[in-house]
Image (cartoon, grey):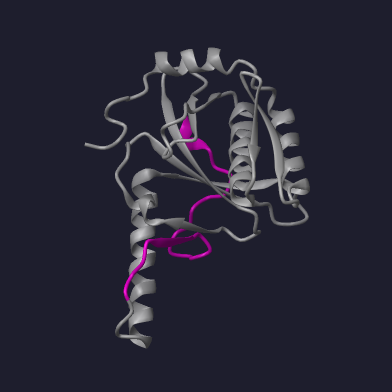
């Protein structure tokens, strides 16, 4: 039994969450917050106001702010495409956003992985290989390749993310063991979409249709 089995979100749940988070602004203002957070988040403390019932969140680590940047950027992109986007309630670390499609008949769960670099490569924990929910979509976010501004997005269903992670880690471990026979695998995983074996389209949000 996975951790979400006690609370499988329904379309009614998402609509209720949408009412609770009705202070989400427009996609453009979310993008502006994400850009400002990324640009200015270089001090010892970071102050990021996310419109969730007018709450203000304080973050004291760069990794937390980076995660919020990614979530804001993904929420903005999905909103601009006509989807309903809600911030997930606390207590579900595997889920960042709930998304209801334009037809209001399909909903997805979203986990955002953000890296401020310009290459589609992300360092994740082994939990990315867990079976969580077939509706889960991983959205990997990185900075757009110049001269473009903003972000690039790679949307992968849970099953594909799991397969890529396992295959790439098996190759990496085999290479390390050739150099060091005593090498022991750890809990970190690298999702590298520069690998031509995995031609994941950039900025393709069709999995949310």
Is residue 179 shown left or right of residue 193?
left
Q: Classify the position of the N terminus by image quarter.
A: top left
- Number of numbered discs overlaid on the protein picture: 0
Report which quarter residue 26 is drawn in: top right
Q: Nearer the viewer, residue 23 or 109?
A: 23
Residue appearing at x 48%, y 28% in the figure: 88
Residue 89, x across and y down, in percent = 47, 26
Q: Nearer the viewer, residue 58 or 98?
A: 58
Residue 208 drawn in magenta: yes
Q: Is residue 148 above or below residue 105?
A: below
Report which quarter residue 133 is drawn in: top left
**Residue sticking out furthest to the left:** 1
Q: Is residue 67 above or below residue 82?
A: below
Is residue 88 shown left or right of residue 165?
right
Residue appearing at x 31%, y 48% in the figure: 130
Is residue 53 shown left or right of residue 132?
right
Residue 89 drawn in magenta: no
Main SS, magenta region, reads: loop
Residue 10, x across and y down, in percent = 37, 19
Q: Is residue 146 above or below residue 5?
A: below
Q: Which residues are magenta?
A: 184-209
Is residue 96 shown left or right of residue 157?
right
Residue 193, x across and y down, in percent = 50, 59
Residue 54, x across and y down, in percent = 66, 20
Q: Is residue 39 above or below residue 103?
A: below
Residue appearing at x 68%, y 52% in the figure: 144
Residue appearing at x 32%, y 25% in the figure: 8
């Amino acid at each position: 039994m996975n951790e979400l089995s006690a609370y499988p979100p329904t379309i009614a749940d998402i609509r209720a969450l949408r009412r609770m988070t009705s202070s989400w602004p427009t996609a453009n203002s979310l993008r502006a917050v994400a850009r400002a957070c990324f640009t200015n988040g270089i001090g010892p403390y970071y102050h990021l106001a996310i419109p969730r019932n007018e709450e203000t969140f304080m973050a004291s680590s760069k990794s937390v702010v980076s995660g919020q940047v990614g979530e804001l950027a993904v929420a903005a992109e999905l909103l601009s495409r006509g989807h309903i986007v809600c911030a997930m309630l606390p207590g579900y670390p595997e889920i960042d956003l709930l998304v209801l499609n334009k037809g209001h008949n399909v909903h997805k769960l979203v986990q955002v992985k953000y890296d401020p670099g310009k290459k589609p490569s992300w360092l994740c924990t082994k939990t990315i290989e867990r079976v969580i929910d077939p509706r889960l979509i991983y959205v990997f976010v990185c900075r757009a390749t110049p001269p473009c501004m903003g972000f690039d997005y790679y949307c992968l269903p849970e099953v594909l993310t799991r397969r890529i992670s396992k295959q790439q880690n098996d190759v990496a471990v085999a290479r390390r063991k050739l150099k060091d026979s005593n090498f022991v695998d750890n809990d970190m995983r690298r999702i590298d979409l520069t690998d031509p074996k995995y031609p994941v389209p950039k900025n393709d949000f069709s999995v949310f249709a």
